[in-house]
Amino acid sequence: MPLSPEQFRLLSPLLIGWIQRTLAEHACGARPVATLGFRRLPQYFSAELLTAAKVVAVERVPVPPLSSLGAPGFEAFETMPAAGITYIDTFFVDRRCAADESLHFHELIHIVQWKLLGPERFLAAYAAGLETHGYRDSPLEVMAYDAQGRFESDPVPFDAERLVAQSLRIYFPAA
Ligand SMILES: [Zn+2]
């Protein structure tokens, strides 16, 4: 059953609190993406973004405990084995995928989405997309997977931050 706007209004601060605690717990292990030495990422993202964006390599990426925060119905998402997940200016990657530049590219697309939408609107849009379309077909994921597909198949660099800004204007005209 979809979350009502009222349910989401109650969930949102709990979720943001959980995210802030999770980021604080991993702050010591967070490194700027710019320091990882990936060759292609600087051709798609600004130095400013790659310095501000941080990555934490972990044994298991932390997924919000939505059911215990009072939002049942996301069990599939909660238990999905994820290689990466992004919260605000930081993303987590499974240690075994720490050298995967394409995965880092995907999560950086989410970093740009978080930045342009702001946490409240990102969470509302992500939750709505998840409920309506499921994980893979939710608009914010489609945007990330489409850009990642282009990153993998086309060697010609593009401005990924501008691409996200343009896509967000189509999906979310107010962004
Ligand atoms: Zn994603």
Image (cartoon, rainbow, N blue to C red):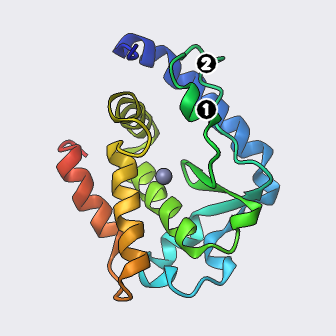
On whether ligand 1 comes within 8 Å of the CB at mark 2, the answer is no
Asked if residue 157 is positioned above or below residue 77 in the image, the reply reads below
> Where is residue 126 drawn, in percent x and y?
41, 37
Dot 2 surroundings within 10 Å: few (below 14), some, or many (20 or more)?
A: few
Q: Nearer the viewer, residue 23 or 93?
A: 93
For badge 2, the amino acid type reads Ser
In the rendered structure, the answer to whether residue 25 lies left or right of residue 67 reads right
- Badges 1 and 2: C-beta atoms under 8 Å apart? yes
SS under mark 1: helix
Q: Which mark is residue 93?
A: none
Determine which residue is flagged by label 1.
78
For badge 1, the amino acid type reads Glu
Could you tell me how far apart the alpha carbons at marks 1 and 2 are, in whole angstroms? Answer: 8 Å
Residue found at x 66% / y 38%: 20
Residue found at x 66% / y 62%: 55
Asked if residue 69 is positioned above or below residue 117 in the image, the reply reads above
Determine which residue is flagged by label 2.
67
On whether ligand 1 comes within 8 Å of the CB at mark 1, the answer is no
Residue found at x 50% / y 69%: 105
> Where is residue 91 drawn, in percent x and y?
61, 55
Dot 1 surroundings within 10 Å: few (below 14), some, or many (20 or more)?
A: some
